[in-house]
Amino acid sequence: MDILYLLVPLSLVLVFLIGGVFWWSLMSGMFDDLEGPAWRILQDDDAPAADGANPPPGGDATRAGS
């Protein structure tokens, strides 16, 4: 029975802490656009990569001299 004097206040602190983090995430806009990332992954991106971003065709760039 004595453990309830510890567990009840601890659980209330935990509930308020989790509620505060959830409220902060709502107010900071984390849940504003839920569908954007799902559609963005489906978009076709055929733009060429920047120079040096892709290794040369035909093998490893570190073994080019050997």
Image: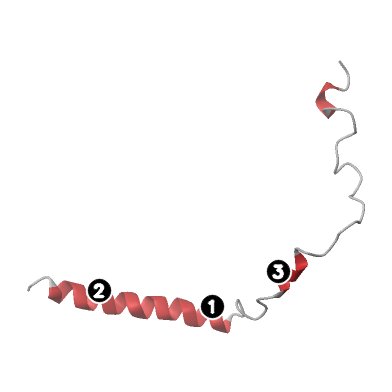
Q: Nearer the viewer, residue 15 or 42?
A: 42
Quarter of the picture holding the C terminus: top right
Determine the residue located farthest toward the left in the rendered image: 1
**Residue 58: where, in percent of width, then height?**
89, 28
Side of 15 where 6 appears, left or right: left
Q: Earlier in the sequence, mark 1 or mark 2?
A: 2
**Residue 60: where, in percent of width, then height?**
82, 28
Judging by the rendered image, the residue that carries numbered circle 2 is: 10
**Residue in view at x 56 percent, y 84 percent:** 27
Judging by the rendered image, the residue that carries numbered circle 1 is: 25
Contact (CB < 8 A) between labels 1 and 2?
no
Q: Residues within 10 Å of mark 1 (few under 14, many from 20)?
A: few
Amino acid marked by disc 1 = Ser
Q: Which mark is residue 33?
A: none
Circle 2 — which element? helix
Q: Which mark is residue 38?
A: 3
Q: Earlier in the sequence, mark 3 or mark 1?
A: 1
